[in-house]
């Protein structure tokens, strides 16, 4: 395994991190729990291969992730960097402390290495973190309950640059992958400021876990898109950890193999990737830029989501994940909207589209291709 320094924390961390948010489950719905017989050996295999960074959160895996991580840490605690999160942004200090104490109990530890404000954006930082939550974080740090004050981040590059300029977090966990490069400037600024960078979603939440005739041929010798995606993230010298949500032993073995290889991507490879992705992005934007001006639809049709799914197949050649994504719309999984079949042809969306796209026609086209 290859290790990097996580910014001003000074921690030496494996460049592959274990994201404990997609562990294998048993049971249905709200009663589902993590399959311990599968999950714990997976985590131990990663530890044995040199992975020493694991990330979890209160809500992951039906609120069972922290418990399983705590069990898996037995016998490994002194060798592993543990990251978890506090999602509270209210004004009740006791509620915030209750979540910290709950995490310590579930994880069966006396101290958390990387403690994150969960899902910070520009508004939540200015309104909640800076004036209030940061005080509670520092209290917990002084009491020895946490070592490093960090955050996970969900916002744009301008907001990231502001967060970096504040100097507040020791490390930031953020989205970065082949399909989402908007934060590259902020990532470079964070690294320059000594703030650790943990890139979550290196395979874009599974969107880059599919075969693709388009993406699979960009770099000679790399046919599998997940490998290309992981190597792309690791090739950025400003990233310290690629945090992968691993759900099977096969994924663990593949990711470990890739991340133990010192050769990531050459400058020529990265140029080839950039050129191809810019061309593909222009193709996708001709179809839909995802601006959301067409929303809301009176029938609840998830127009941008449907077009994003269609672009996965049409532009990037990832038809399996495109179809799976479309199937998940309205299924209580990841998008609460409705499929194209409920469109009534009212045309209201087309009057609001700045690109003047024939949305109704394209919805029918997408539905046929994604069925």
Image (cartoon, grey):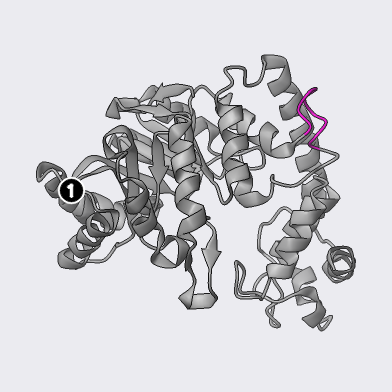
The rendered magenta stretch, by its main secondary structure, is classed as: loop
Looking at the image, which residue sits at the far left? 143
Question: Residue 351 versus residue 133: which sits nearer the camera?
Answer: 133
Q: Residue at x 49, y 39 (%)?
A: 45
The count of marks equals 1
Q: Can residue 325 be seen?
A: yes
Query: Horizontal and vertical percent for residue 57?
Result: 38, 55
SS label for mark 1: loop
- On whether residue 221 falls in the magenta region, the answer is yes
Q: Which residues are magenta?
A: 215-223
Q: Residue at x 33, y 45 (%)?
A: 73
Looking at the image, which residue sits at the far front? 37
Q: Can residue 19 be seen?
A: no
Looking at the image, residue 225 sits to the left or right of residue 150; the answer is right
Note whether 156 is above or below 239 in the view shown: below
Query: Horizontal and vertical percent for residue 134?
Result: 21, 49
Question: Residue 362 versus residue 317: which sits nearer the camera?
Answer: 317
Query: Horizontal and vertical percent for residue 252?
Result: 56, 40
- On whether residue 353 falls in the magenta region, the answer is no
Looking at the image, residue 191 sits to the left or right of residue 286; the answer is left
Residue count near mark 1 (Cα–Cα under 10 Å), binned few <14, some 14–19, many ≥20: few
Note whether 275 is above or below 107 in the view shown: above
Looking at the image, residue 301 sits to the left or right of residue 220; the answer is left
Quarter of the image that includes the C terminus: bottom right
- Based on the displayed image, in which of its 4 quarters is residue 235 positioned? top right
Query: Horizontal and vertical percent for residue 345?
Result: 84, 80
Q: Residue at x 69, y 56 (%)?
A: 290
Return the residue at label 1.
110
């Amino acid at each position: 395994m290859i290790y990097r320094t996580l910014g001003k924390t000074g921690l030496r961390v494996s460049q592959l991190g274990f994201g404990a948010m997609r562990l294998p489950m048993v049971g249905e719905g709200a009663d589902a729990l993590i399959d311990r017989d599968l999950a714990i050996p997976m985590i131990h295999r990663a530890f044995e291969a040199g992975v020493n960074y694991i990330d979890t959160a209160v809500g992951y895996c039906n609120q069972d992730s922290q418990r399983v991580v705590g069990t898996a840490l037995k016998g490994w605690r002194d060798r592993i960097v543990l990251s978890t999160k506090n999602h509270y942004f209210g004004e009740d200090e006791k509620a915030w402390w209750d979540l910290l104490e709950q995490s310590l109990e579930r994880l069966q530890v006396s101290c958390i290495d990387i403690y994150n404000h969960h899902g910070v954006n520009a508004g939540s930082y200015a309104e909640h973190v800076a004036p209030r939550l940061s005080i509670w974080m520092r209290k917990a740090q002084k009491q020895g309950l946490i070592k490093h004050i960090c955050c996970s981040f969900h916002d744009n590059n301008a907001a990231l640059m502001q967060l970096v300029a504040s100097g507040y977090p020791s490390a930031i966990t953020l989205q970065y992958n082949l399909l989402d490069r908007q934060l590259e400037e902020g990532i470079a600024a964070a690294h320059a400021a000594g703030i650790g960078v943990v890139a979550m979603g290196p395979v874009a939440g599974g969107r880059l876990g599919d075969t693709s005739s388009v993406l699979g041929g960009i770099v000679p010798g790399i046919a599998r898109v997940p490998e290309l995606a992981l190597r792309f993230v690791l090739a950025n010298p400003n990233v310290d950890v690629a945090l992968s949500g691993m759900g099977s032993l096969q994924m663990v073995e593949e990711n470990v193999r890739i991340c133990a290889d010192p050769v990531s991507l050459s400058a020529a490879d990265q140029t080839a990737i950039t050129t191809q992705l810019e061309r593909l992005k222009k193709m996708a934007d001709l179809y839909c830029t995802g601006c959301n001006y067409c929303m809301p639809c009176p029938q609840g049709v998830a127009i941008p989501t449907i077009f994003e799914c269609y672009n996965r197949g049409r532009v990037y050649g990832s038809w399996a994940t495109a179809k799976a994504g479309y199937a998940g719309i309205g299924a209580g999984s990841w998008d609460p909207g409705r499929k194209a079949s409920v469109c009534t042809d009212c045309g209201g969306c087309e009057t609001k589209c700045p690109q003047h796209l024939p949305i109704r026609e394209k919805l029918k086209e997408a539905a046929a291709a994604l069925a």
